[in-house]
Amino acid sequence: MERRIGDELVGRFSALAGTTVAIYAVLVVLVFAVLGEFQLRRTLEHTADVIESLLGLYADPEGSPTTVAPEMLADQLVGMGQQFAITRTTGGGDGGVYFLSPTMPAKRLAGLAAASSVSEVRQVVLEAIAERARWQYRVLHRASGDFDIYMVGSRMPFVWAIVGLSAAALLILPAAIYVSRRGARQAVGAALQPLEAVVRQTRTIGPADLDRRLATPTGQVEITELADTVNRMLDRVDRAHRALESFTGDASHELRTPLSHLRGQAQWALATGRTPEELREALGAIQREVERTNKMVDDLLLIARGGNRQIALERRPFELEPVVQEVEEIAQAMAADRGLAVQSIIENGAVALGDPDRTRHILLNLVSNAVRYTSEGSVTLAVRRRDGNVGVEIRDTGPGIAAEHLERIFDRFYRVDQSRSRALG
């Protein structure tokens, strides 16, 4: 099922716009998530730096391994507003591990053997924090001397922001697609107006209006090129139509003459009192006229087949010299009673690729025209090589063709001078 080009373009533009907006929304959400995670990590790192610096100021006044941070230090840590935990592995023989946090007093961690190593303690604490934090929190661990700092930051603020952003994108996406579709329809409609104008003008051109042309320029390069192409096609159609009309008139005139002659000869022969000798003369005239008419019909059929590309052409190497010599002999016979000199200039060994019979026919047509339209002087056939190619030139001393007719000399049935052409057959 065919679609209008406007609907096709609108559909493709809308799909592209929707895909682009969706990809953009996904990229924005991903970038926001990455930036949020990066910012959370930087915040935890900064807080850990501050805590580590505060712990560096800590001095145990009594030197007891069970002493925790003084109250002032704990207040400072709590005032930072972050969730954190600090463990300290005490010295001495018991290897006790004590826990410090803003909401809990110092105490020994339960479930740990007295001989637990520092790495084992860290593993237990990390597992405990991870069990409670799950994916909603990011955990940062840093070892600082006897202390281990565990920072916990919530991801939920920017998670909710991402959820809100995604919801907004889902709500905006249909509206964006709708707006883009309306905009695309208006833009495509405006862009296709010159094309629609070309279509309307082309539809109004009929067989009787072949002299009309499409208006150019159209405002768009592509549409102007299309209009120019259509105009050139109309030029060719118009020329062919005029040539066909001229040919129809000429053919009708040329056929009417032999038919009238045949009818006159037949009526004369049918009259009573004709001798056998007179009948033979009439039949001979009729035969000659029929042959002439038959040749004319054959020429017309040849022209028609050539226009429809139905002529079978050979494609083989052949020597030009014998073909040109044969044409030269025929031309000399044609020019015998006109006082024209017909000569040829042939380079030996000139070989062409093509159909020798059709080549002979073409050269014979050109030479016959040269002889017919040259009142005095000469007609010369020359075989020449040029740039690796071989060709035949035919020159005459006739009046030539005016410059305004040169563009149309290859148009079918075109005649420069109608009266002179008919006078010369």
Image: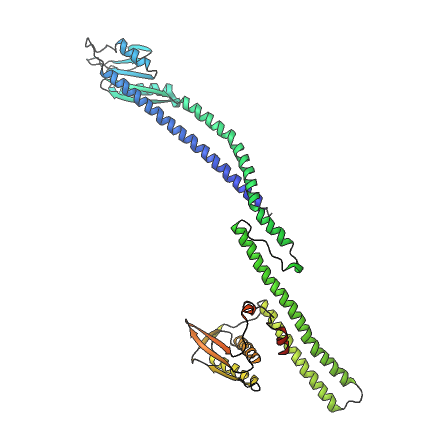
Q: Residue at x 32, y 24 (%)?
A: 42
Give the x, y percent position of residue 308.
59, 66
Q: Nearer the viewer, residue 192 or 94?
A: 192
Q: Residue at x 31, y 16 (%)?
A: 85
Give the x, y percent position of residue 65.
21, 11
In the rendered structure, the answer to whether residue 207 lies left or right of residue 338 reads right
Give the x, y percent position of residue 112.
28, 15
Residue 103, located in which quarter of the rendered image? top left
Residue 48, located in which quarter of the rendered image? top left
Q: Nearer the viewer, residue 216 or 85?
A: 216
The answer to whether residue 144 is above or below residue 65 is below
In the rendered structure, the answer to whether residue 222 lies left or right of residue 157 reads right
Residue 190 visible to an observer of this rendering = yes
The answer to whether residue 188 is above or below residue 284 is above
The answer to whether residue 172 is above or below residue 287 is above
Q: Residue at x 68, y 80 (%)?
A: 290
Q: Nearer the viewer, residue 278 or 146?
A: 278
Q: How is the image coloured?
A: rainbow
Give the x, y percent position of residue 145.
22, 19
Rendered-image quadrant of the C terminus: bottom right
The answer to whether residue 168 is above or below residue 398 is above
- Counting labels gives 0
Residue 121 visible to an observer of this rendering = no
In the rendered structure, the answer to whether residue 155 lies left or right of residue 322 reads left
